[in-house]
Amino acid sequence: MPDIILDVQGLETVFKTPEGLVHAVNGVSFELKEGETLGVVGESGCGKSVTMLSVLGLIPTPPGRIVAGKARFNGRDLLKMSGEEIRHVRGAQISMVFQDPMTSLNPVLTIGRQLQEPLMMHIGMTRKQAQERAAELLEMVGIPNAKDRLSDYPHQYSGGMRQRVMIAMALSCSPQILIADEPTTALDVTIQAQIVDLVKRLRDELGMAIIWITHDLGVVAGLAQRVIVMYGGYIIEEAAVGELYTDPQHPYTIGLLGSLPRVDERKQSKLYSIEGLPPVLYQKPQSCPFAPRCKWVMERCWNENPPLETISPDHRVACWVDTKTGRSRS
Amino acid sequence: MTTYIIRRLLMVPVLLFGVTVLIFGMLQFLTPIQRSALYIRSEPKTDKAVEGVIRQYGLDKPLYVQYWNWLVGVVDNNGERKGGILFGDFGYSRVASQPVADLIRTRFPNTLDLTLWAVAPVILVGIWLGVQAAVHQNGIIDQAARVFSIVGTSFPTFVFGLLVLMIFYANLQWFPPGRLSDWANRVVLSDEFTRYTSLLTFDALLNGRFDIFLDALRHMFLPILTLSYINWATFLRVTRSSMLETLRMEYVTTARAKGLPERDVIFKHARPNAMIPVITLAGFQVVGLLGGVVITETVFTYPGIGQAAATAAAQLDVVTVLGFALFNGFILIVANLAVDVLYAFVDPRVRLS
């Protein structure tokens, strides 16, 4: 049984906006085991990114604020660390890749310079050593003529290549955890597949744990061992990847899976879509946040927010309804 | 980089042509005899003399001939070239009784001197404060800077100028208007004072006359204060908002996620990007200052080019005013070139595309 390296408990993050306090993350708890790949799924605005940014202390404060929770990493609470302490975790032990490679690299600094920074900072390499290592890293992520391309600027790289650079940068200090925040969303489909393959290959070589945030259940299926589904800042379902796809329990998960196009289906059927948008929560809801969009909705859903409950050793769900029978659970 | 600069340089003749055509077009609003000031000193008095002047300098010829004459000048009966802006002859100011070019030569260094001393505090303090205000948004520095900058933008120059004149000259008598004290002026005009650069403060230092340097600065203090404050208000706001915008960029989050110290995130990753619009503004402001700041120079009776232009305009000395306008056009073109080159230094996307 591999050790748990990241243990997040009861994380709550709020944002102060002119319209009021937005509850972006509402008591999120999850664990990440060594070398494991965890998929985090949900529509935009479900609190996936904010959860991960909170863990790394990257929430802009103000307007954001972490109001409760723990995030134990190697026995220490990341949320209690000073700015200086968590800085040495970021990029060294936990690193992040962002959604849009067109904007996540600094346009006025060379690729080489940006790759060298974490190496010099966290590992204490000299500029020369860092430069050699940067070239190796670029080679590792499959960029041809790596040595010559160090002096290029981001705008001279294509989108896919930039995302490779981001991955190389994130992995440069051999982190224990790589958080990938929708790293393929901004890329076209063929490049997406390349990036997923690259990450798989690097995971096998380097053995880091991965948190892969996405709204694409298809990508997660081939990559993750375990999946968390988030909605309205809550985890509403969590399961091993096989179980989630064969036996989804939460209406939202069922809806997400139903909205995936399938190649094995002959019939030309219309893709399923979940009506409406995820809520912006100005108050902690007294009802299930998904109730307004749910076709199984019952009386109880409007009065009580269902807690996340274990229904089998590998499966947790937060829903009052047993979607198989349409009746109340338990 | 080289191609980029060459491309910019190739634009210069085109721009110069545009500016000259524009100014020449405006000169056509004058009567031929008024335009004769472009070539000769005194206005001809008799009808016969008028006709002679018009014929000699082609003032009744087609426009393209006149334009050419205006550019290269006309050779008179004595074989002397008269006029010709390409040779630096902008005509004759009948009001100031001297060639327009001489007027520019004596007045412009004063304006340049003032500009250099005003621009340095604006840019250095403006960038520093703008960055600080953005980094500590809504903090004390930010609030104070915002109040100062709103006051600065809404204060008309002449009100602010008169206010400081009242306080520091009329009441406290610390900083006099004008250019130099009488004793200093006598030294400057004497033979023992060499005008190396025509910029008084620099010449004073080069001559080792620290007392004259201080005297010149003392006279410049109020105009510098006024210009700095007024320009600084805009400069600060642009730096601040540009920096705020940059700090929200994803690559700044990337830099933080890499574990860089906040100092590096701000000064190495964010600030260079935030400087791009600031350079544009700095270019505009320097051009504005070099063109002569009419109100400030007038309020403080500072003998710069703006004051001269205002006097010329008030006396309907159109040839002089347009001469200044032409000169200003040249400065604008040079300053734009400088801004473009600076862009290339700051932004590789400009440099390499």
Image (cartoon, rainbow, N blue to C red):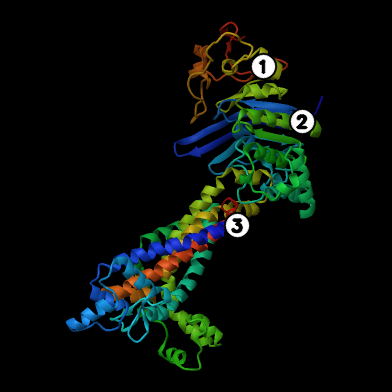
Question: According to the image, label 2 marks what residue?
Answer: A201
Question: According to the image, label 3 marks what residue?
Answer: B1
Location of the N terminus of chain B (image quadrant): bottom right
- Note whether residue B44 is visible: yes
Check chain identity for marks 2 and 1: say if they share one. Answer: yes
**Disc 1 secondary structure class:** helix
Residue A167, image x and y in percent? 70, 38
Residue located at (77% from left, 30% from top): A201
Q: Marks 2 and 3: which is nearer the front?
A: 3
**Disc 3 secondary structure class:** loop
Please indicate whether residue A298 sits to the left or right of residue B106 in the image.
Answer: right
Q: Is residue B321 above or below residue A157?
A: below
- Note whether residue B229 is visible: no
Residue located at (65% from left, 46% from top): B255
Q: Say the numbered circle drawn on residue A68.
A: none
Question: According to the image, label 1 marks what residue?
Answer: A244
Q: Amino acid at mark 3?
A: Met
Dot 1, how many residues are within 10 Å of its Cα: few (below 14), some (14-19), or many (20+)?
A: many
Dot 3, how many residues are within 10 Å of its Cα: few (below 14), some (14-19), or many (20+)?
A: some
Q: Of B270 and A329, which appears nearest the observer?
A: B270
Q: Of B44 and A261, which appears nearest the observer?
A: B44
Question: Given the image, what chain letter belongs to the residue carrying mark 2?
Answer: A
Check chain identity for marks 1 and 3: say if they share one. Answer: no
Residue A181, image x and y in percent? 63, 33
Dot 2, how many residues are within 10 Å of its Cα: few (below 14), some (14-19), or many (20+)?
A: few
Q: CA distance from mark 2 to mark 1?
A: 24 Å
